[in-house]
Amino acid sequence: MPYILLFLAISVFGISFSCDAEPFTLPRTDTVLLKDKHSDNEYPITIKLPPSYQKQSHKRYPVVYLLDANYSLPIASGASRFMMNSGSIEEVIIVAIGYQKGMSGLNSRIYDYTPFEDKNWQRQTGGARNYLNYLKQSVLPYIDAQYRTSQKNTLVGNSLGGLFAAYTLFTEPTLFSSYVIGSPSVWFKQHDLLALPVVPTSKTTKVYIGIGELEESEGEQMVSGARQLAAKINKQSGALVTTNLFVIPQARHATAFPTTITQALDWIYQVNDN
C-alpha cells in the first residue's frame, strides 16, 4: 500500500508541477534578425551573455560563433555552463547563427556552408563565399558594436559547418583567433577542399578538429579526411597555428559534436590556474 500511495503522490504532484511550470528558456539570451548588408538575406542571430556580463560593466569577453544554431546552441550552452560557472574556462559570449529566413534549414546550410558548386547535388551548393562575407561584414561588426567583445573569437562548425570553418581558415584565417572544426565534410566534391590554396595566418591561431572514430566506416572515411585536413593545416597555414586533432572513441557522426565542443572550449579558453 505505501508504494501505491507514493506512486499516486508522485503522479499527482508531477502533473501539478507540469501545469504550473514556466517554459524553459536559455538564460541571458536575445535573438535578432540580422540582414545581409549586400543582399536581402536575413538570418536569426541568438546571443547568450555570460553570467557576469551585467555586473562587470567594464569587462570585455571572447565570442564563440556557432553555425547550425538550432542544433549547436543548446549543446554549447549546456556544455559551457559548468565550466564557466566553476571558473575552469573564461566566460564567453555565445553567438549562434541560424538558417536563412524563408529557406528550409537543410537547403540553407547546404548552400551557405559549401565552398564549391557541385551539380551532382539536387540542392543548390557553393554559397560559402557569400556567407563568409555576411559573417565578416554584417555579423561580426554588429556583435562588436553592440557588446563588449575582446580580440579573441572562435568559429565553430560541424559536418558541413566543419567544412565551412576549414574554408574560412584557409581563405580568411585572421577573421577568427581560433577554429573548432567538428566532423568536417572533407569529402564534399571529391575532397576539393584539400586542393584549395591556403592563406598563411599572420597571428597566433588555435585549431581544434574533433572526429568520431566510427565515422571512418559510416560511408565517407571521415577520420582519414580529418587527418588529411590536419596535415594540410600543419603544413600550409604557418608556424603560428597550433592544431589539436582528437579522434573520439566510440563516437559516430551523430554523437561526436557534444564531445568536440566541450573539449574544444576547454582547450581554447582554459584558465591557467586550473
Image (spheres, grey):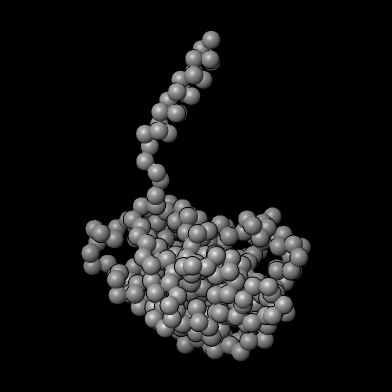
Does the rendering let one see residue 211?
yes
Q: Find residue 134 and report its horizontal and vertical position in percent.
A: 44, 79
Name the quadrant containing residue 245. bottom right
From the viewer's side, name the closer residue of 6 and 85. Answer: 6
What's the residue at 45%, 75% (across, down)?
A: 41
How many numbered markers are drawn?
Answer: 0
- Position of 261 with respect to 116 (left or right) is left
Q: Find residue 36 and report its horizontal and vertical position in percent.
A: 41, 78
- Position of 225 with respect to 30 (left or right) is right
51 over 41 or under it: above or below: above
195 over 160 or under it: above or below: below
Q: Find residue 74 and report its horizontal and vertical position in percent.
A: 48, 55
From the viewer's side, name the closer residue of 209 and 31. Answer: 31
Residue placed furthest toward the top: 1
Does the rendering let one see residue 239?
no
Q: Find residue 253 and report its horizontal and vertical position in percent.
A: 66, 60
User: Which quadrant is the C terminus positioned in?
Assistant: bottom left
- Position of 107 with respect to 176 (left or right) is right
What's the residue at 53%, 15% (across, down)?
A: 4
From the viewer's side, name the closer residue of 122 and 244. Answer: 122
Name the quadrant containing residue 177. bottom left
What's the residue at 30%, 69% (across, down)?
A: 147
From the viewer's side, name the closer residue of 95 and 82. Answer: 95
274 over 121 or under it: above or below: above
What's the residue at 68%, 83% (across, down)?
A: 192
